[in-house]
Image (cartoon, coloured by chain):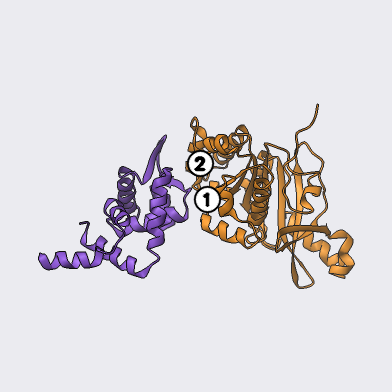
Chain colours: A purple, B orange
Amino acid sequence: MEKDSLANRAYTGDIDPDLLDFLNQYVDSFIKWDLMRFFFNNPHTIDTVDNIARYAGRNQETVGQELAELAERGLLEETHMGALVVYALSADPELRDRLARFIQASEDRQFRIRAIYHVIKGSY
Amino acid sequence: MQSEARALTGVPGLDQMLSGGFLPRTANLVEGAPGCGKTTLGMQFIHYGATHGEPGLILTFEQFPEQYYRDAAGFGWDFRDLEQRRLLQVIMSSPEVTKADLERFNGRISGLVNSMGVKRILVDSLSQFERLTDDPVELRNLLHGFLNALRREGLTALLTREAYVLLGDESHSDDETEENMSFLVDSYIMLRYVEIESAIHRAIIVLKMRGSAHDTHIRQFDIGPDGLVVQAPFKGREGILSGTPQYMAESFIKAFVRRG
């Protein structure tokens, strides 16, 4: 237990507190991470689960669950258009800025390794 | 009564073909084979508008927005900067979502028209609507509603559509959508590859322009470092380009006239 906790600190200790908070709040799976990168690169996407799954090259069922969770947490907006349920990135500039910081930080290998470890182990 | 200013495309030569540009609040179809320059023409139209007081939207059903940013940068058009200045927005969506959005009151597109003052839209491509239904009557009604919604929002639209014809010898006489489309849109521009003397050239013709005179010549066009540039009609350059006028005439017939 103590060993685990020491390892966790070694991996997450150096992470910027805001990025760590972002990881804890939103990134608990690699699919979510992937979807975040997709929305960061294509920030004005608005579409259904099946189309977003197709764009991301992922399984529809899994993507549907992850999109719904990201919407619950406020990173995405869920809108009902008649029979369609569509998702888009939150228009909140602060949230978009935090996402941009996270994606940009992910370009750094050291940060990426720490973040991957964090996702695998779950949040702390 | 003073007529409204036309929407210049910014494509040298094309605006002259269109008697000064597209008429405002019209739906304008650009149809052509893959890679012949439809999207580039559309991006040029949007870029020209965004840098001349007419903000625009690009509605993509196929390519990722990243590809537009990259391709536009190749022509020196900074789409990311235009987005930051709220003169452009590249939206990735699907026909069904766009249709539903335009049908509801104060949808996303309507909101952008109001908040950004959007005047132009590139829809790339209309071919994606064809996967919504196999019924040609339903498709026609669907497209009719979609184009009318764009007009209602006050947008001058440039719509691309894939042509099945690559070089003019692969005719699809059962392309019912093409016939429907030509009735629904206000102008109809065709881009084609033409083979002359074992070299591929690009050709453009304005087949239809509702409510306006237009050039009926088939002209050559090039895609250069600044985008599309329409050249002189092929007609006057027959001797220079081919040396075989008879052969060239056959190429044009194959490229532009559907076989019965």
The answer to which image quadrant residue A11 occupies is bottom left
Q: Is residue B226 above or below residue A48?
A: below
Parent chain of label 2: B
Residues indicated by labels 2 and 1 sit on the same polypeptide chain? yes
Whether residue B163 is visible = no
Give the farthest residue toward the left.
Answer: A1
Q: In this view, does B72 lie above or below B20?
A: below
Whether residue B229 is visible = yes
- Which residue is label 1 attached to? B61
Residue at 38 percent of width and 67 percent of height: A108
The answer to which image quadrant residue A105 occupies is bottom left
Parent chain of label 1: B
In the image, taking residue A37 as reference, residue B132 lies left or right, namely right
Residue type marked 1: Phe
Q: In this view, does A60 lie above or below B142?
A: below
Whole-percent x, y for residue B238 in the image: 87, 65
Residue at 64 percent of width and 39 percent of height: B119
Q: Quadrant of the N terminus of chain A?
A: bottom left
Whole-percent x, y for residue A60 in the image: 35, 53
Helix, strand or loop at label 1? It is loop
Choose the circle earlier in sequence order: 2 or 1. Answer: 1
In the image, taking residue B124 as reference, residue A63 lies left or right, namely left
Circles 2, 1 touching at the beta carbon (< 8 Å): yes
Q: Which of B23 and B176 is in front in this view?
A: B23
Give the farthest residue toward the top.
Answer: B1
**Whole-number angstrom distance, CA of label 2 to CA of label 1:** 10 Å
Q: Which of B147 and A110 is in front in this view?
A: A110
Q: In which quarter of the image is the C terminus of chain A?
A: bottom left
Q: In this view, does B7 lie above or below B193?
A: above
Whole-percent x, y for residue B99 in the image: 51, 39
- Which residue is label 2 attached to? B98
Whole-percent x, y for residue B45 in the image: 68, 49
